[in-house]
Amino acid sequence: MKTRFLRDLKVSAIGYGCMGLSHGYGAVPERGESIRLIRKAFDYGCTFFDTAEGYGAGDNERLVGEAVKPFRSQIVLATKLRLNKRDGDTAAVIRGHLEASLKRLGTDYVDLYYQHRIEDDDKVEEVAAVMGELIKEGKIRGWGQSQATEDQVRRANAVTPLSAVQSEFSMMERMFEKDVIPACEELGIGFVPFSPLASGFLSGKYAKEQIYTGDDVRRVITRFAPENVERNQPLLDLLQSMAQEKNATPAQISLAWMLHKKEFIVPIPGMRKMERMEENFGASDVTLTRQEYENLEKSLEGIPLYGNRTDEDIAKLRTMG
């Protein structure tokens, strides 16, 4: 697979978002199958694996750590910590979270350590300083922010240069194109889109009649509401049309569009089946010409979108039966 850089971290052009192997999208694969999928991803050339302490209450870190153990030194392993406004000593709290993650991952360093959302804007510089200390100590190789604003990115980077910003980005969520992505380009920071296929919506594989149950965020993500699936059909039609022209799939066109945009963008789709892995990693070989990209951009401008994915909506899942 082709490679890219998140500042100075060399990674595969498409990474692996591992959250769905533990929770978030309904029934999860059997543990042995999840480990097999992660190791198969490495065989395909994927060298960038993403997890977080909050995915499955730490279980995802344990799973990913076990799976990547045979090739740990050959990959970039990313995880995240969540800081709360009520937390006390920032340095002590961050170090405590990191040590717990290292233990679950079965490693003595993390390549990329993100702050998972930013609840306390007043501590941006303080967090950045602690991350700088951890880099000097070799506990982490680089650090990042998630869903950060342009101001937060600039302030943090001025203290300790960021390796990457991980935020939602897809054809259905482009808010960060206005300011954060240009700032990343200016400052030499990588941009890592999560939900690059809009939680699978852009694959075109979900009908409005689909029923979602249990621990499945699509129950509360409004773009999956039956009426919005129907109203967003023009976008799926556009993707299907270009996919036929390029002998590809709608998901591959969605990822190829993203890869064409900027060289520092590295999407991390989630994959729970071998065929999805082959499809998504295969997108790195789908190349859009400049004219194809411009035509696609022009078409996208004329398509209204309905529904989105917000943290507030996802929080509702906890109280649903």
Image (cartoon, rainbow, N blue to C red):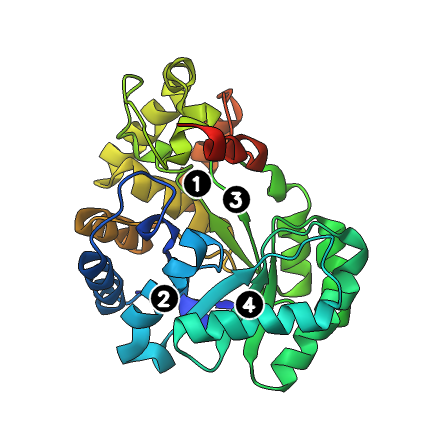
For marks 2 and 4, give the CA distance: 16 Å
Tell me which label, 2 or 3, sits earlier in the chain. 2
In front of the other: label 3 or label 1? 3
Q: Is mark 1 on a helix, strand or loop?
A: helix
Image coordinates of residue 145 in percent, x first then y, are: 62, 58
Quick check: can you spot residue 181?
yes
Mark 4: which amino acid?
Tyr
Q: In this view, does 135 lie above or below 313?
A: below
For marks 4 and 3, give the CA distance: 17 Å
Q: Which of 189 and 74 lies nearest the eye of the viewer?
A: 74
Q: Is mark 3 on a helix, strand or loop?
A: strand
Q: What element carries label 4?
A: strand
In front of the other: label 1 or label 4? 4
Q: In this view, does 227 lie above or below 253?
A: above
List the residue tagged with mark 1: 293
Mark 2: which amino acid?
Arg
Image coordinates of residue 221 in percent, x first then y, are: 46, 29
Q: Classify mark 2: residues with Cα within 10 Å, few (<14), some (14-19) or many (20+).
A: some
For marks 2 and 3, give the CA distance: 24 Å
